[in-house]
Amino acid sequence: MRWIDTIYDLTPIELFDGMYFKRDDKFAPLGLGDINGAKLRQCIWLVDGWVKQGCKGVVSGSVSQSPQHAFISEICKHYRIGCVITYSKKDIEKSPYLFRAKRLGAKMLYSKVGYAKTLGALAKKTLEVLPNHEFLETNITLEENCNSWSRIRDFHAVGAEQVKNIPDNITTLVMPCGSCNSSTSILYGLIKYPKPNIKTIVLMGIGNHGSYNIEYIEHRLKHISDKTDGMFDWSFEGKEGFRHKMRYENLNGTGYCDYSDTFNEKAGSIYFHPRYEGKCIRYFKQYMKDLWNEKTLFWIVGGNIR
C-alpha cells in the first residue's frame, strides 16, 4: 500500500460520553497506536513531493521527545530514501522516538545544544554537504523563510479535506493548538467546505510558544491569513464579516499547566495524548462543561505512539 494514496481518506467522527470527536489519530498507516495523526499526513505529502523531484534523503532535527523522529524515519523507510537526524540526547535508548529512528537506519548527528531551533539549524546546514537531500522543518511546519506562500497554502490544503465529514448539527468546534499547523488546516477547510451551523471555534493553547507569549496563536493565525489573502477567518472578536466567533483558551500561558506537564484523560475508549489533548479534556471538563454536548466536536490531532 502506498501511504500517499491514503492521505485524503476521511478519518471518522465518533460519539463518546455525549460529545463528538474527530479521530485524526486513526490516520495510522502502520496500524492504530503506531505513528499517526494530522502532522504525519502532511509529512507524507511533503516527502512524496520531494521524492518525485529526485530527493535521495531527508534531514530533520527536533527535541528528543518529538514524534517527528519516528514520523520521518518511518516515511523515509517507506520511500527507501536516506534519513539524517540531528539530536542532543546522549542516551538514545532512553528516548523512544530517537531510538526508533536509529533502529530504522537513520544516520544520527549529535549536537551539544538541544534546543529545537539549534537542532533545526544544524539539520538545515547539513544540506551543504548532502546533495539531493531535503530539510524537514522542526514541528513539520512550513515557514515563510523557506517556502512560498502558495506552497504553504497547498500544504494546509491536505489537512483541510478532513473538514468534509463534520456533521451539519455541530455548532462548536474545539481543537488543541500549539504550532498552529493543524488549526490552520482546519480553519482553511471551513472556508473551502463551509458547515452550516458552526458558530464558535475554541482554540486550546497547549504549545510551548504559548507558555511565554500569550498572544502567539492570535498573531500567528492573523499573519498567515493576511499573507495568504484570507485563507481563513482569524478574528477573535467575531467582527462583522467573519463567519466564525473565535475563542482562545491558553492553558500553558495562564498558569493552568506547564508545557512539560502530562494529564491522563479518557472518554469512552479514547485515551488522549497526555501532553496535548489530555490537558484540553481535563480543562474542558472543569471549565467548559456547558459545551460538552452533542453539538460540539473535539478535534483529536494525534494520539500516543506505542
Image (tube, grey):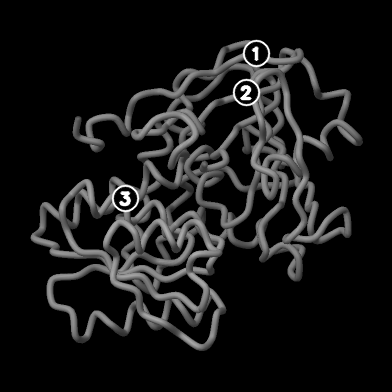
Which residue is pictured at 37% across the width and 55% down the height?
Answer: 152
Label 2, label 1: how many angstroms apart (C-alpha)? Answer: 6 Å
Q: Say which of marks 1 and 3 sits in front.
A: 3
What number is the disc on residue 74?
A: 3
The answer to whether mark 2 and mark 1 are in CB contact below 8 A is yes
* Residue 1 in the image, given as x and y percentages of width and height: 19, 30
* Looking at the image, residue 12 lies above or below residue 125: above
Residue type, label 1: Leu
What number is the disc on residue 296?
A: none
In the rendered image, which quarter is residue 76 located in?
bottom left
Which residue is pictured at 55% across the width and 21% down the height?
Answer: 195
- Comparing 27 with 179, the one in front is 27
Residue type, label 3: Glu
Q: Image check: 21 left or right of 84?
A: right
Q: Which SS class for mark 2?
A: strand
Q: Residues within 10 Å of mark 1 (few under 14, many from 20)?
A: some
* Looking at the image, residue 241 lies above or below residue 205: above
Q: Image check: 191 left or right of 234?
A: left
- Comparing 40 with 152, the one in front is 40
* Residue 236 in the image, given as x and y percentages of width and height: 72, 47
Q: Which residue is labeled 2 in the image?
A: 21
